[in-house]
Image (spheres, helix red, strand yellow):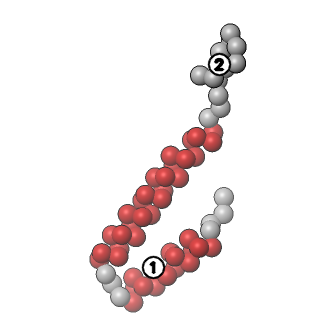
Amino acid sequence: MGVSPLFSLVVSYNLVNLFLDFDMYAVVVEASVFIAAAGSISLIKPIGLTKPVLFKEGNKVK
């Protein structure tokens, strides 16, 4: 899985902006967005890994 160029650009811009003009509100917002994105990815990944289980009687998906 590669890194999106847009994501890389946003991270780079925010790091440069953080060092040039320190703003605690921006740091909190960026950290919360990163945590939310990481949480969403961790919830989406297991969905693709699960496989439907069939009952012995027929094609009923569990």
Q: Earlier in the sequence, mark 2 or mark 1?
A: 1
Residue 15 vertical position relative to residue 46 in the rendered view, above or below: below
Q: Amino acid at mark 2?
A: Lys
Q: Position of residue 51 (x, y in %)?
A: 65, 32
Q: CA distance from mark 2 to mark 1?
A: 50 Å
Q: Residue furthest bottom?
A: 20
Residue 54 locus on image (x, y percent): 67, 20
- Which residue lies at the image location 35% right of the left edge and 88% below the top edge? 21
**Image coords of residue 57 (percent x, y):** 68, 9
Quarter where residue 2 is shown = bottom right
What residue lies at 42% left-to-right and 59% top-to-bottom? 35
Residue underneath mark 1: 14
How busy is the neighbourhood of tag 1: few (under 14 within 10 Å), some, or many (20 plus)? some
Q: Residue furthest top?
A: 57
Q: With respect to residue 11, does 36 lie above or below?
A: above
Q: Residue at x 39, y 67 (%)?
A: 31
Q: Which element carries disc 1, helix, strand or loop?
A: helix
**Residue type, numbered disc 1:** Asn
Q: Which residue is mark 2?
A: 60
